[in-house]
Amino acid sequence: MTNAMASLRDLDPQYPVPLVHEFLSRPENKAYLDYTYKDPFGCHVFPGDIEDYPLSSFFADMNSEIARAPQIHLWAYIPCCRYRCHFCQFPTITLNPHTASSQAVMKDLVNLNIKEARLWLAKVPSLAAVEVGEFNIFGGTPSLLPESELRRLVAFYKDHFNFFAATMRFEGEPGTLTKSYLSLLQELGFTKVSFGAQSFDDRFISGSGRMHSAKECIETIYDAREVGIDWVSVDLIYGMLGQSVDDVGYDMETTRQLDLSHVVCTKLHLEEFMKIRTGVSGERRSVWQKAGLGNCNNMSFPGLGKQYQMRELIEKNLKGAYREHPTMYFYRHDHQPEKWKGLITDLDKQYPEIAVGLGGSSKCTKAEAINITSYNAYKGALYEDRLPIQECRGMSPVHREVTAFKMALSTLSPVDNGIFKQRFEGKSFFDNEMINCTLSGLVGKSLVVIESDVVTLTPYGVTLVEAIINTQFAPAYR
């Protein structure tokens, strides 16, 4: 028996066998099983097919598309943290925020971010005028920024970009998102706050290397509401070291009790980002990667079977009160889904995205580029007055159609051929040989249904959407 099959058969007898278990057990579905077992994080990564794409062409493509776009997504990455989580592979700088040297580093980070943004404005002139649909300050832990530096960063973006219709979203960490800091965010115009809790159980919070408590997570949620920020998104992870299906059930019960507006439920990913080229690739392995998938501190990681039992328990607990859009992102039914995700993935939008900062990923329909992930190399590029782009890829016309379809599929919403035709001058997605061939296979495996030119994922398809996107549209797998 292969390692993948053994992992799939690791089940908690107290819970039903997951829906996809029988599907993944079939020999003819080996590509799906291998993908899910290898554990890559790839559903939200859509690289181009033309390597070594000229930067001049990339900037021209971005400028042209941004000039025509109703809105864009703009984000700034602040890569500093006060500790490194055991699962983290992101490019970050670990520092003690209370030391003078760290204050200097944070000032430098803001200086570098502003300098890079100025270079983007120079290279892509249409960027200054286009409406920013949503502005995100991501991390890392941006809530480590002192008030003066945060004010300076926000003032720069508001002065140099079109924030007329923008919503503003901020990512922090419970140990640093104090009530006074949340009040500052509200004053500056932020209406959305997100943070990683990973769990509402202190055993798994501390076990993943985090330095806050479940109580602090809950206090942050209530403090945000008290200062006038009702839109709070919490990141949870399932499949962590020593975690049981029951433990995930507890997190879901707490989510419902807190009446969270938004929650992200992500499966733990241990495949190395640097192997699979993502916009958040770091340069070193995480603590848990180094430990491997065997026993660690007399505990083990739940197998694939238990992970899918966890996923089904999440769906069961959130059903009715929450909807999922895109995959992993749940929003309460009386709210809206993640705006920034919709701007870049919804079939009727898929607008350009500009990411400023270490490891940022910027794209339009014709090309995409990933920033340098080494902090020293990143600084070096900016000191030489050039954008810190590490790699750039273009997209051929056929690849643009496939990417648009895959991005739309990742939203879990029905994919309408009528909207696709509007995007591609009357061309149907059935006219694209790869899409058409893939759809035939997906229908045959009951992963999608097609009715009246609309493609809808089945329950199997929703659960396996990452594997569908990353294996079935690639000739090497099919």
Image: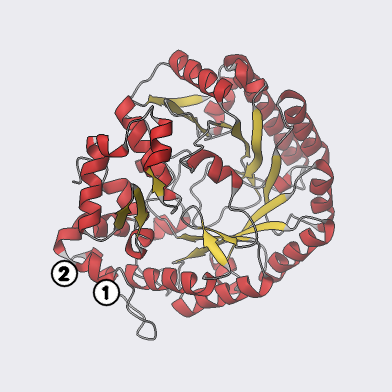
Q: Position of residue 417 (x, y in %)?
A: 37, 42
Would you name the residue on which mark 1 appears?
Answer: 9
Q: How many C-alpha atoms fall within 10 Å of the one at disc 1: few (<14), some, or many (≥20)?
A: some
In front here: 282 or 115?
115
Q: Position of residue 58 (x, y in %)?
A: 46, 19
- Residue 88, placed above or below residue 78: below
Does residue 288 appear in this view?
yes
Tell me if residue 372 comes above or below residue 190 in the rendering.
above
Way the structure is coloured: secondary structure
* Cα gap from disc 1 to disc 2, whole angstroms: 10 Å
Instruction: Please identify, in this view, whether the residue under mark 1 or under mark 2 is nearer the observer.
Output: 1
Residue 151: percent from left, percent from top = 81, 36
Q: Quadrant of residue 475?
A: top left
From the viewer's perspective, is 267 left or right of 440? right
Q: Amino acid at mark 1?
A: Arg
Residue ID for mark 2: 1
The residue under the point 36% across, 65% down is 459
Q: Earlier in the sequence, mark 1 or mark 2?
A: 2
Q: Amino acid at mark 2?
A: Met
Query: In which image quadrant can residue 118 be found?
Result: top right
Q: Residues within 10 Å of mark 2 (few under 14, many from 20)?
A: few
Q: Nearer the viewer, residue 379 or 354?
A: 354
Task: Residue at 20%, 51% (x, y): give it.
Answer: 441
**Mark number displayed over residue 203:** none
Dots 1 and 2: beta carbons under 8 Å? yes
* Residue 5 in sight from this viewpoint: no
Quick one: quadrant of the N terminus? bottom left
Q: Residue furthest front?
A: 452
Residue at 40% x, 16% y is 54
Q: In this rendered view, identify the residue nearer to me: 215 or 36.
A: 36
Q: Judge left or right: residue 160 versus residue 338.
A: right
Identified at 65% across, 54% down, the residue is 194
